[in-house]
């Protein structure tokens, strides 16, 4: 299957029958073609199958990449669905603005950020991306064009709506002002989940960006807390510096064994030792927010079979998060290798989407090389821990949650389903609703 | 930097314009579809162009080119560069049976281009400075049975630009011929993709380098230069049998 219309984890293998590439908003393809359901497609950074439409039609929006307006004084952008965050940063940073919320990669489209209602390291102060969207245009298969604001029910279904309510053509959203392109950061090691929760709490009170890397081989929850803020003074880059594709790239699949337990455990130990020494430092925003973007096609390191991500949020119980403890114990006991493991506390700011993932609690994101059935079994057992705790799993990362668990995670799913466009569907949606 | 782009809504032109907009250039854009021209202009203003003017341009309207030239003169006392970036890729099979289609293709891709080059030459010669860049194609390097209508039109453009290059060199004006191979744009959307395809952004980078840094005939990506040298070197009695 062509690499370019796979998902980021390259699992499952679910190619479309056809791909339509959109170039102009005045010439949209037929959104209700005879040869199958359609699904809008951005840069394909979702890990599982929310961006796949097996046997159907993908609407590639990446050439719908024009800016409609950029108010440099008020910090408001209106742009077509396919503009990448990378492209946008090259325009807004020199003008003294930054994304209000950014996920861990800049190679996602604005509409993709809305459709997954992405979150970032600043969730505890800024909430999700959808909170900053003022209006958007949605085109439905019956030809209706809707200009939606947060007051509209269809807006709440479209934010976090995984592309299922129709085709987003443009989005207008607010930015945050910055005075420098650098980040002031600090790393603090922790040796237990309790220590993490306390450290995260105090860091959250003083820093807008807080996230932790955790060693998933250690059940007690050992890791490094990384907090940061935009440098309050400094310099902005000259306009016109382009966001280049990374110079380092993995041109071929790595051998899957490279990320097996012994190698990964050694990597984890070394990474912990290095990060724990870091203390306070300053760096450019790019490696701070997008460390993995530096290596093009890093997903190939997991080999041809790809990998699976598991990201969940589990609620607080008082000041503790016992389900997070249990998830870590589960993973450490399984022997599976998770190299990139991220822990963060979500804040109270409500997500605007009916299917939005973040809610108050602790979120844990784990990567697993795809070892077939044993990996699926592990992820499903993690799903059960999350379901029992009243938490949920992030659709943008998911490739295997059961339909039953999906309904448990998202009890509002039926209300959402009423807004799904009859001509739109995805492999994910078919999987979790049958 | 002041830049005129004719055919400003084409994929390569948009990519070139974005590079210049990011550097704060003043742009003059001409294209046929007014709605798309306006959308392109808005994009470039948002990306930092110092100013963006627009004017309609239809390749079939040769006399109308004079209006365009007047408008450009009234906006830019000095024009630093002009890029001709419009064209159509005909269905070769259809043109083989339809003489009117051949005439239309030649009008669009050859006649209107060389007439426009003539008008631009007058403007730049009077200025005694600047650069004219025109997008031709590797297809213009040899008449091939699979696309000779397109190829012949582009070949005419390449030859015309070559002559113009010599005429204007004494006046301090450069003429750059851009020869891309396959580029990933809506114009080639119906062709199956292969590893030879270049992105409009890569071609745009090369065009900007040629406009600012020098170059006469620019093959982009560069591997097309030796490839087309090889294609041109094949004896005719052999080439005609190759069905390329």
Image: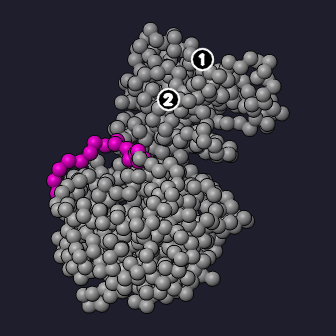
The residue pinned by badge 2 equals B83
Q: Quadrant of the C terminus of chain B?
A: top right
Magenta range is: A231-247
Quarter of the image where one finds residue A184: bottom left
Q: Is residue A149 visible from the viewing direction of this image? A: no
Q: Chain of mark 1?
A: B
Viewer-proximal residue among A267 and B132: A267
Question: Residue A261: in sight, yes or no?
Answer: yes
Looking at the image, residue A253 lies above or below residue B18: below
Mark 2 vs mark 1, CA separation in Å = 15 Å
Q: Position of residue A238 (x, y in %)?
A: 28, 42
SS assignment at label 1? helix
Which residue is denoted by mark 1 in the rendering?
B160
Q: In this rendered view, identify the residue nearer to me: A399 or B107.
A: A399
Q: Residue at x 24, y 87 (%)?
A: A319
Query: Is B10 on the left or on the right of B107, as rendered?
Result: left
Label 2 environment density (alpha carbons within 10 Å; few <14, some 14–19, many ≥20): many
Mark 2 element type: strand
Residue A236 drawn in magenta: yes
**Residue closest to the far front:** A262
In the image, B214 versus B160, the foreground residue is: B214
Could you tell me which residue is drawn at 55 percent across and 27 percent down? B219
- Model colouring: one colour
- Return the x and y of residue B157 as percentages of the image width and height: 61, 22
Is residue A27 highlighted in magenta?
Answer: no
């Amino acid at each position: 299957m062509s690499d370019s219309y796979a998902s980021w984890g390259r699992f499952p293998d679910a190619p479309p029958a056809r791909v339509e590439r959109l170039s102009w908003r005045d010439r949209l393809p037929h959104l209700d073609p005879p040869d199958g359901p359609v699904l809008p497609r951005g840069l394909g950074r979702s890990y599982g199958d929310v961006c796949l439409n097996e046997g159907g039609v993908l609407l590639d929006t990446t050439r719908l990449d024009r800016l409609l307006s950029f108010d440099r004084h008020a910090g408001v952008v209106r742009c077509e669905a396919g503009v990448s965050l990378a492209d946008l940063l090259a325009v807004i940073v020199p003008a003294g603005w930054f994304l209000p919320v950014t996920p861990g990669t800049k190679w996602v489209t604005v509409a993709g950020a809305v459709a997954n209602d992405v979150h970032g390291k600043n969730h505890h102060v800024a909430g999700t991306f959808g909170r900053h969207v003022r209006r958007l245009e949605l085109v439905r298969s019956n030809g209706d064009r809707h200009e939606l604001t947060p007051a509209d029910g269809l807006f709440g279904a479209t934010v976090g709506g995984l592309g299922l309510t129709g085709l987003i053509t443009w989005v207008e959203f607010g930015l945050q002002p910055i005075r420098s392109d650098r980040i002031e950061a600090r790393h603090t090691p922790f040796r237990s989940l309790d220590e993490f929760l306390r450290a995260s709490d105090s860091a959250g009170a003083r820093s807008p960006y807080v996230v932790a890397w955790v060693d998933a081989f250690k059940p007690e929850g050992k890791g490094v807390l990384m907090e940061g803020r935009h440098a309050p003074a400094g310099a902005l880059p000259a306009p016109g510096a382009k966001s280049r594709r990374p110079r380092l790239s993995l041109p071929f699949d790595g051998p899957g064994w490279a990320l097996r337990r012994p190698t990964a455990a050694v990597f984890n130990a070394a990474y912990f030792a290095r990060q724990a020494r870091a203390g306070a430092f300053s760096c450019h925003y790019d490696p701070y927010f997008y460390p993995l973007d530096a290596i093009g096609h890093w997903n190939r390191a997991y080999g041809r079979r790809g990998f699976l991500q598991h990201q969940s949020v589990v609620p607080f119980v008082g000041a503790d998060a016992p389900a997070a403890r249990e998830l870590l114990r589960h993973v450490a006991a399984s022997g599976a290798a998770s190299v990139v493991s991220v822990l963060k506390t979500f804040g109270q700011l409500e997500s605007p989407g009916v299917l939005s993932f973040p809610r108050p609690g602790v979120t844990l994101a784990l990567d697993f090389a795809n070892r077939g059935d044993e990996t699926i079994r592990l992820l499903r057992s993690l799903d059960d821990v999350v379901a029992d705790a009243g938490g949920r799993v992030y659709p943008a990362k998911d490739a295997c949650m059961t339909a039953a668990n999906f309904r448990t995670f998202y009890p509002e799913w039926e209300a959402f389903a009423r807004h799904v466009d009859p001509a739109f569907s995805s492999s994910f949606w078919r999987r979790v609703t049958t | 930097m002041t830049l005129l782009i004719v055919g400003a809504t084409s994929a390569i032109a948009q990519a070139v314009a974005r590079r210049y907009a990011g550097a704060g250039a003043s742009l003059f854009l001409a294209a046929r579809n007014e709605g798309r021209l306006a959308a392109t202009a808005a994009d470039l203003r948002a990306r930092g162009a110092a100013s963006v003017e627009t004017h309609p341009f239809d390749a079939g309207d040769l006399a109308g080119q004079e209006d365009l030239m007047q408008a450009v003169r009234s906006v830019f006392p000095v024009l630093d560069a002009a890029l001709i970036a419009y064209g159509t890729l005909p269905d070769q099979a259809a043109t083989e049976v339809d003489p009117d289609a051949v005439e239309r293709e030649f009008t669009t891709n050859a006649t209107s281009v060389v007439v426009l080059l003539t008008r631009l030459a007058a403007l730049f010669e009077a200025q005694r400075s600047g650069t004219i860049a025109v997008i031709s194609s590797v297809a213009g390097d040899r008449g091939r049975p699979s696309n000779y209508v397109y190829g012949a039109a582009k070949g005419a453009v390449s030859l015309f630009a070559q002559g113009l290059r010599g005429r204007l060199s004494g006046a301090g004006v450069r003429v750059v011929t851009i020869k891309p191979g396959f580029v990933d744009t809506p114009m080639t959307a119906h062709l199956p993709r292969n590893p030879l395809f270049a992105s409009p952004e890569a071609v745009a980078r090369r065009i900007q380098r040629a406009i600012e840094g020098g170059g006469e005939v620019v093959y982009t990506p560069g591997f097309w230069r030796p490839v087309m040298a090889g294609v041109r070197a094949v004896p005719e009695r052999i080439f005609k049998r190759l069905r390329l």
